[in-house]
Amino acid sequence: MNEPDFTIGIEEEYLLVDRDSLMLAQVPDAMMKECTAALGGQVSPEYLQCQIEIGTGVCATIDEARQDLKHLRTTVRDVAENYNLAPIAASCHPLADWKQQHHTEKDRYNQLRIELGGVVRRMLICGMHVHVGLNDDPLRADLMGQMSYFLPHLLALSTSSPFWQGEDTGLASYRLTVFDNLPRTGLPPQLDSWGEYDRSVQALVDLGVIEDSSKIWWDLRPSSRFPTLETRICDVGPRLEHTLSIAALIQCLTRMLYRLRRDNQRWRQYDNFLVAENRWRAQRYGVNEGLIDFGRGAIVPFADLLDEMIELVGEDSEALKCTTEVTGARDILKLGTSADRQRAVAQVAAVAGDGHTDQMRAVVSHLIAEFSTDL
């Protein structure tokens, strides 16, 4: 087997807020046209009218992804400012009510509204997806099962949705709670081969339940559009460099698993029942309470697990020229995840005597500022 290039692509969804009220605002048609004129097919509407989605091109390196993502973020921010709007890269708006939002008039989204009913109306959430290029389908299927082990670790680092409709949910990623109400979500099943995956998808297509595999929304899936393995579990994050660190980890973990396969080895696969427990811990606590190391039979502090991951992919980060970004994931622990930082902002506002609504407004202002931190 020829070694894959492990190219990388990053997709992000943003919420648009009014700079004065700090509440969600519909993306104006003129703004979308202006963004499209500047970015072409790399920008598009999302399910709700208050959302906008961007996607990098196929990038050979993380540094190439940095330049592309920085350009995309900067353009959306600058164009939005012309309309007194600002993008925020957080998976939930701290104050917004989903019942007040409307979906984008587009055939695909209209069909989703019909098929999914009240469940899809609550999808006032944004995520970040990372594609890693792999050169054949059996390889994608094989690595998907092994990569699932690391999905909770990646979620923990990315958590950015502690608030929902003005309330602290007690979770680091409330987004996942909302998303999991959709069908065909969660951890991917443990499949033995590409053939088994293909037959399973085709069974639903033949029944008319779905038209293609793009309606499968697992945390990790073979992309239906590209020859990639697509990691979908992550919250979207406000800081560009933190996003790149998570993306670099995904890229390097994929290469590490490929190396094991090349050398006739495998990462041990655990039943989804066990991996789901770590997924829940990441969703609930982020990086603050540790995850289960099933080999040790112990709950291990996340800082220790991150150090182990960085060491595990050391050869791969060197080969892919992203050691700085991979080791930069430690900065997330130093500063706290976005969920941690949002709570800290709310707490400072509370100590200053601000009422609850003003505490949440302070969080939105913080998210607007953080969007530009690394641009």
Image (cartoon, rainbow, N blue to C red):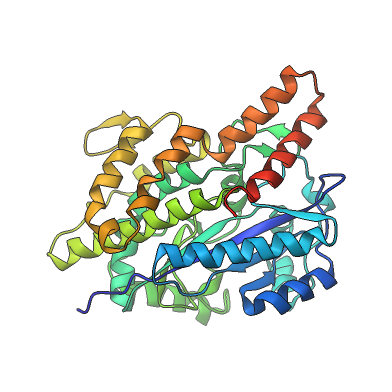
The quadrant in which residue 228 appears is: bottom left
Relative height, residue 46 to residue 331 (above, below)? below
| Residue at the far bottom in the pictured view | 206
| Residue at the far left in the pictured view | 264
In percent of width and height, residue 73 lies at 63, 61
14 or 180: nearer the eye?
A: 14
Relative height, residue 272 to residue 166 (above, below)? below
In percent of width and height, residue 41 lies at 63, 78
Q: Residue at x 48, y 76 (%)?
A: 224
In percent of width and height, residue 167 lies at 72, 32
**Horizontal side, residue 300 vs residue 345: left or right:** left
- Residue 90 visible in the shown view: no
In percent of width and height, residue 26 lies at 83, 60
Relative height, residue 296 to residue 51 (above, below)? above
Q: Quadrant of the C terminus?
A: bottom right
Relative height, residue 158 to residue 207 (above, below)? above
Q: Residue at x 32, y 58 (%)?
A: 252
Q: Residue at x 34, y 40 (%)?
A: 306
Q: Count the numbered circles shown.
A: 0
Q: Quadrant of the N terminus?
A: bottom left
**Horizontal side, residue 174 vs residue 264: left or right:** right
Q: Residue at x 76, y 65 (%)?
A: 79
- Residue 328 visible in the shown view: yes
